[in-house]
Image (cartoon, rainbow, N blue to C red):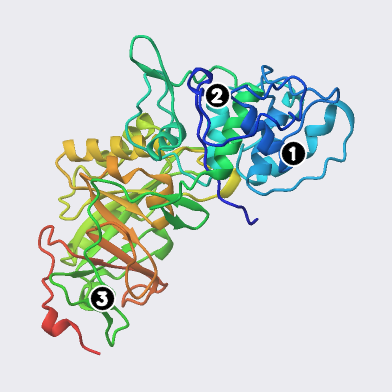
Amino acid sequence: MTKRIIALMMIALLLLTGSPITASASEASPFPDVPTGAWYYPYVRDLYNKGILNGYGDGTFSGADNVTWGQSFKLILGSVGVTVKETVPGPDWASVYVAPAIDNRLVPSFDRSRLTQVPTRLEIAQMTARAMDLVSIAGQSPYADCNDGYVVKLHEKGIMVGIEGEDGILRFEPNKPITRSEMAAIIWRVINSDYQKSMIRFNNYWIDRLEGVAPSPYSASQFSLNTAQRITYSGGYYATGIDVSEFQQNIDWNAVAADGVDFALIRVGGRFMQSGGIFEDKYARKNIEGAKAAGLDVGVYFFSQALNAQEGLEEAEFVLNLIKDYDLTYPVVCDWEYLGGSTARTYLAEPADITAGIAAFCQRVQQAGHIPMIYFNQYCGYIKMDLSKLNQYQFWFAEYSSAPHSMYDFQMWQYSSKGKVAGIRSAVDMNICFVPYQNGVTQKPSSALSS
C-alpha cells in the first residue's frame, strides 16, 4: 500500500502558546466552541478546511475531550493518505478503520470493543511513528519516565518535545491521554513535517545511519568470480568457507578440504520458531569432529530466536556445553533470524528485546574464551537489531550477491546458498572471511583473481 510519509511533533498543552501557522481572527471559527484566540485554533481551522478533521454531530469540536482509539485511527490514517469510507452509522462508525490501521502497522491487532476507549500518549506516539515508517532503534532517552524507542526516535528527529517540570526534568508522561485539541496540533505537524531529511529508505522503512558503527570498507570492484564459481577478494587477506547443518546430512570432509575450503561453521542447534524449545542439530558433533579431522578451521553457530537477555543466555549455555570438549579456531555465532511470519513467536519482537538477547549470548560466549559473532542480513541488521549496541562483537553479513552492500563493516560474508563443494551432495552456503582468526589459509590478491 502506497503511503505518504508523515512526521510527528507532540507538544504539551502548556508549551503550545505559539503557532507556526496563522489564521485571521476575522475568519469565522468552524466550531462555536473553538475561539479564534485559542492556541489550537490555527491547527483546527487548517485541518478542517482540508477535510481532515471534523466535529461532533451537534457542531462542536470539544477540544478538551480525550481522543478515542477510533478517532486516533481516523486522524492518523488520514494523515498518511489512507482514504476510508465510513459505511457504518451510529456508535460503530469507527469499526471500518480497524483493518486499515492493522494493514498500515499502526497496531498489530485490535479488539473492536475498545474503539471508544482512550489510548495513552505512548500509544499515540507508537502508532504515529509506525505510520511514519520509523523503527524503534534509537539512542538514549531524554525522558525521565519513558525509554520507548519510538518516542526516543521522534525526539532524535527534532519533531517531539516533552514536558519540562518545575524541577527541570523532561518527562513524556506516557500514561496520560491526548486531548482533541492537542491531537489537532499533532496531526497538523505530522502533515507538514519534513523529518525524513538525511534518513535512508530501506524497504518500507526510514532509518538513520547508526553512530559508532564502522561503515563498510568494501567496494564491488574488489570481488570477482573465479573458475570454480566462487567469489574471490582482491583487497587483502581472505579465506574460503562454508556453513552447514543437518540438512547437508553426511559430508566427506576430506573431499571438502581438498576442494579449496579453508574453514567451516557448523550449526550446533537452535530454538524452535513456534514453541521456543531448544534443539541440538543431529549432525553437530559429527560435523565438528569431521571438519577438524580434515584440517579445517572450525567455528559454530546457533539458530537463535531469543526474545530477551534470559533466553540469549540460555542459548549460549547450551552452545558452550555442547562445544566444551572441542578446540575451536573460528567464532561462536549467534544466528538470529526473523522467519516464520505471524505464526512465529518473534513476530512482534521489538529491536531492543532482540538486541538484549543477542548481547547476552555474545557476552557469555566471550566470557568463556571464544570469539562471539553475530549473523544478520540487511533487514535484520537495519530493522530488527540495534547494531550500535552490538558493535564490540564480530559481524557475519549475509547477502546473496556478486558483491556485498552492507552499510556497515563486517568480518565475514555469506554470499551464496547454492554453492557446490566436493564431498557435499546438496547445495551449501558459501562464505568469505576477511580476518585470520587462527590458522586460516592466506589468499594472495595477486593470485586469487583467476577467471
Residue 116 on image: x %, y %:
74, 23
| Image height of 146 relative to 288, above or below | above
Q: Are marks 1 and 2 in contact (CB under 8 Å)?
A: no
Q: Which residue is mark 1?
A: 97
What numbered label is drawn on residue 121? Answer: 2
Residue 397 on image: x %, y %:
32, 59
Residue 276 on image: x %, y %:
48, 37
Q: Earlier in the sequence, mark 3 or mark 2?
A: 2
Q: Residues within 10 Å of mark 2 (few under 14, many from 20)?
A: some
Image quadrant where residue 76 sits: top right
Q: Secondary structure at mark 1?
A: helix
* Residue lying farthest to the front in this orientation: 26
Residue in view at x 74 percent, y 48 percent: 83
Image quadrant where residue 168 sits: top left
The amino acid sitting under disc 3 is Ala
Instruction: Give whichever of 274, 163 is nearer the camera.
Output: 163
Report the Cα–Cα distance between label 3 and label 2: 62 Å
Q: Secondary structure at mark 2?
A: helix
Residue in view at x 74 percent, y 39 percent: 97
Q: Which residue is mark 3?
A: 255
Instruction: Give whichever of 387, 162 is nearer the camera.
Output: 162
Closer mark to the observer between disc 3 and disc 2:
2
Q: Residues within 10 Å of mark 3 (few under 14, many from 20)?
A: some
Q: Are marks 1 and 3 in contact (CB under 8 Å)?
A: no
Report the Cα–Cα distance between label 1 and label 2: 20 Å
Q: Earlier in the sequence, mark 1 or mark 3?
A: 1
- Asked if residue 390 lies left or right of residue 87, the reply is left
Instruction: Give whichever of 299, 293 is nearer the camera.
Output: 299
Q: Give the quarter of the figure containing the C terminus.
A: bottom left
The amino acid sitting under disc 2 is Arg
Residue 370 on image: x %, y %:
17, 45
